[in-house]
Amino acid sequence: MLKLYSKSHEWAKIDGNVAEIGISDFAAKELGDVVYVELPEVGKSVNAGDELLELESVKAASPVFSPVSGTVTEVNAELEDEPEKLSSDAEAVWICKIELSAQPAGLMDEAAYRASL
């Protein structure tokens, strides 16, 4: 499995032609306590850089952008009842899965991402 990061603080954990999508710990700390996750619809097509979903925290609402292009195949329904999971361990919690329609481009490995912070 390959984990890559976007400049806008999302990650994609890629296994074959499916990517689990989440937010970085940095993004979670910037957001504060997440209180609501607007999950994308299964079947939604996205291009890398498109707004994928929205998170609401005690501070503000914030868009999450797709780091990859493809089709949403699954969402983490647990986040509807327990959005705070993203605040406590963002790097371990996936939000949705996307079947890739193209190879990811313009993403960073963890070392490059950490250096960019």
Image: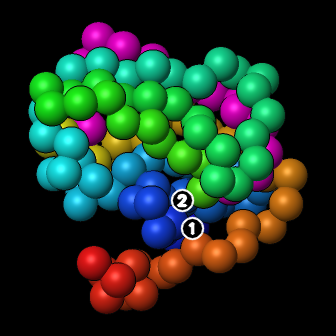
Q: Of residues 29 and 111, which is closer to you in this image?
A: 29
Q: Considering the image in quadrants, where does the C terminus appear?
A: bottom left
Residue projecting furthest to the right: 101
Q: Residue at x 76, y 48 (%)?
A: 47
Q: Is residue 105 left or right of residue 21?
A: right
Three-letter code for the amino acid on which mark 2 is drawn: Lys
Q: Residues within 10 Å of mark 2 (few under 14, many from 20)?
A: some
Which labelled disc corresponds to residue 114? none
Among numbered discs 2 and 1, the one appearing first in the sequence:
1
Residue 53 percent location from the top left of the image: 52, 30
Residue placed under numbered mark 2 in the picture = 13
User: Residue 73 at what x, y percent from top left?
Assistant: 71, 30
Q: Are marks 2 and 1 in contact (CB under 8 Å)?
A: yes
The quarter in which the N terminus is drawn is bottom right
Residue at image coords 23%, 48%: 28
Disc 1 designates what residue? 1
Does residue 84 appear anywhere in the picture? no
Q: Is residue 50 above or below residue 8?
A: above
- The quarter of the displayed image where residue 67 is located: bottom right
> Where residue 5 sits in the image (x, y, percent)?
48, 68
Mark whose residue sits in front, 2 or 1: 2
Residue 76 belongs to the span the image colors magenta: yes
